[in-house]
Image (spheres, rainbow, N blue to C red):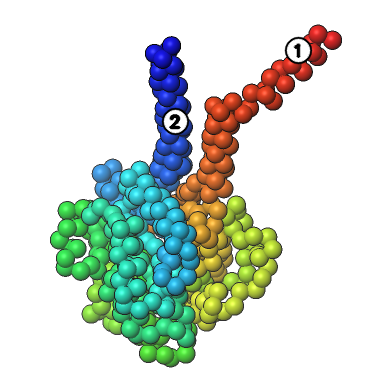
Amino acid sequence: MRSNLGMMKILHLKKRGCFLLKLLCLVVLVLIFCEFLVYYVVIFQCHWPEVKIEAHRSSKQSSASVLKAMFLSDTHMLGEIKGHWLDKLRREWQMERAFQTALSLLEPDIVFILGDVFDEGKWSFSEAWADDVRRFQKMFRHPVCTELMVVVGNHDIGFHYEMTTYKLKRFAKVFNFTSGKLITRKGVKVHLSPRMSGDLNSCLSPIPSLFSPSFVMVNSVALEGDGCTVCSRAEAKLMKLSHKLNCSQQQEQNHSKKRCSDVEQLPASEPILLQHYPLYRRNDAECAGEDSALPEEKNIPFKEKYDVLSREASQKLLWWFHPRLILSGHTHSACEVLHNGKIPEISVPSFSWRNRNNPSFIMGSITPTDFSLYKCFLPLESRVVTIYCIAGALLGVLILAHLQLLNPPFYFAQHLIRKHKAV
């Protein structure tokens, strides 16, 4: 009798252990899918867009001349002042997994972040800034052959009235950023620190630098137009670079003038402007798409020098550089507008789930003469939450069934069904 009771007890414990193991497996599988695999499932569906290649180039040169660039914006990493620690941990984990998955699946040549990397850079003191930078470098780590370039935003150094030379130098020291900086890639004129340049030499394409797409990085926060020290320096650098680019284009067309005789020759292709603030537009009324601003927000007028650049600063940039494309951030929502009827500007939505339910980034296939863009969406946070809720409900049902708390209602339902059939 005792032996039978002992056997029954052992069988009961085994059954309970087996059930708990099944529950644990379910929890682990859901966690693995929602925190790891879902990023691969979604981003795997993204692809690099095709772009036209100049016919006179060889196939090897053509494939090598296409630059694969990723553009994302407004990561808004929380600091020590705002935000709950759990919110910070969750958002940074999401962005890290999304970014690392995109790098492994898509293998871009270069990644641009269009400002507002940090949420509290305008307030943070040295210790907090160092901690923010450390976390950023962990989240956005990348292979040597993938270059990461960052544009400054208002949350990184403050709005114009908060911006100081100290904050700008602090940002520039970490991210090697200066306004009016020219970036060319794929046989490439990239202004890098000596420490990085040696490692990148093995990754760069052997195509001559004059056949390279070029990007101009702009400190749009400094385009206030009030003659402040930082603003004057930023504008002077932009004007100097504009002169060099214009001279290079004239030399390419054999229209060289005396004033261009001693000017360094740069790639003659029309540049792509990268900045945080969008160029001036009245509002987002003409913006469309599932990740554009909410309908009730689209007709709210934008404030110059706060939501968008001023009309004057916008016209200066268009006149100085005659860009073929402009990419900006700041609004956290998507928008595509045409300036002067021919120059497209793409506002890149926020990369953080804290700002959007459907973050995304832009993939660009770029040559010296053409470009093609594709938007890659990240997993919907609402969908991930739904999966967790369904898994939680299923877990609850399994536990109740195991404890036989669902048996009476179940048998009652069975009895009603049999009675109905008998009638």
Q: Which residue is rendered at x = 53% and y = 61% of the image? A: 355
Of residue 118 and residue 217, the one placed in the foreground of this image is 118
Of residue 222 and residue 56, the one placed in the foreground of this image is 222
Residue 114 visible within the image: no
Q: Position of residue 38 (x, y in %)?
A: 45, 41
Of residue 316 and residue 254, the one placed in the foreground of this image is 316
Q: Which residue is rendered at x = 44% and y = 30% of the image? A: 20
Q: Which residue is rendered at x = 33% and y = 57% of the image? A: 140
Q: Amino acid at mark 1?
A: Arg
Q: Secondary structure at mark 1?
A: helix
Relative to 16, is 260 above or below?
Answer: below
Check if mark 1's residue and mark 2's residue have beta carbons within 8 Å: no
The image quadrant that residue 340 belongs to is bottom right
Q: Position of residue 124 (x, y in %)?
A: 38, 76
* Apparent side of residue 335 relative to residue 1 in the rendered image (left or right): right
Q: Residue furthest front?
A: 1
The image quadrant that residue 1 belongs to is top left
Which residue is identified by label 2?
20
Q: In 3D space, how far apart are the residues under numbered discs 1 and 2 (Cα atoms)?
A: 34 Å
Q: Position of residue 110 (x, y in %)?
A: 32, 56
Which residue is identified by label 1?
418
Q: Point out the tag, 1 or 2, that comes first from the N-terminus.
A: 2
* Apparent side of residue 203 relative to residue 112 in the rendered image (left or right): left
Q: Amino acid at mark 2?
A: Leu
Q: Position of residue 115 (x, y in %)?
A: 42, 68
